[in-house]
Image (spheres, helix red, strand yellow):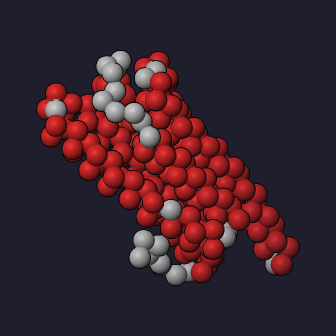
Amino acid sequence: METKHADKRIVFETQMEGLQKNLLQMGNLVEEAIARAIESLKKQDLVMAEAVIKNDDRIDQLALKIEEGCLALIATQQPMAKDLRKVATLFKMIVDLERMADYATDIAKTVKHIGNQPLIKPLVDIPRMARVTQLMVKEALDSYIKEDVSLAVSMAQHDDEVDMLHRQIFRELLTIMMENPRTITQATYLLFISRYLERIADHATNIGENVVFLVTGEQRDLNE
């Protein structure tokens, strides 16, 4: 009986390790999508923007593969207690990463709308906001792999900086629009991009909360 239980344990851990590798691959693709979407904005590189849009299918397919793996693991291994939390956390992380990828795609689509028209202001705060957001995504994934609650909590604290930058961008663009109505269309597109980055940071915070739940079994709001 003990041998059977040990064998089942090995199967669970092996399958879980495979799913986590796929998740990390998905996370790396999402980080790359965010970076390339912002780079396409800075360079007004419409070819790069289109590549980000096309690559979203690859992320979606990987998400589906992980999702199916999670369902198969629940059906065949019937995990309990923390093992079940591990699968549930993985399941929820797929959703957050997929939404991040969607927002990166939205940024790239917005870049295509702006096209090659001269930018109404130098890009300073949006790239800064993107760097903080990308750091949050990386640290969120690291906190999951290491099951590190303190890293998850400290990662989520960066969300305040992202929110502050978003408000700063909003105020600046609003002033530009009021001074020159011809800037309204592009300013609105830049506001969309800022908003998409803010939402990505929110999803990174969600992952941090899932890590806290995974390790402690407690639901905790890291945006408090």
Q: Residue at x 30, y 25 (%)?
A: 113
Question: In which image quadrant can residue 123 be found?
Answer: top left
| Farthest front residue in view | 179
**Residue in the foreground of this view, choosing between 141 and 178:** 178
Q: Position of residue 171 (x, y in %)?
A: 26, 50
Horizontal and vertical percent for residue 8? 76, 67
> How far from the left and from the top, in percent, is residue 207?
52, 62
Which image quarter holds the C terminus?
Answer: bottom left
Q: Is residue 83 above or below residue 115?
A: below
Depth check: 139 or 215 in front? Answer: 139
The residue lying at 45 percent from left, 60 percent from top is 161
Query: For this view, does 115 lie left or right of residue 62?
Result: left
- Residue at image point 58% right, 69% down: 154
Q: Nearer the viewer, residue 30 or 46?
A: 46
Q: Is residue 72 visible?
A: no
Query: Taking 24 as reference, is 39 above or below it?
Result: above
Residue 28 appears anywhere in the view: yes
Side of 175 where 158 appears, left or right: right
| Left-right relation of 31 to 105 | right
Q: How many marks?
A: 0
Q: Residue furthest right?
A: 3
| Residue 219 drawn above or below residue 61 | below
Q: In the figure, residue 80 lies in which quadrant?
A: bottom right
Q: Residue at x 54, y 42 (%)?
A: 30
Relative to the observer, which residue lies in front, 208 or 63?
208
Task: State the image coordinates of residue 106 (x, y, percent, origin top left).
Answer: 37, 37
Q: Quadrant of the N terminus?
A: bottom right
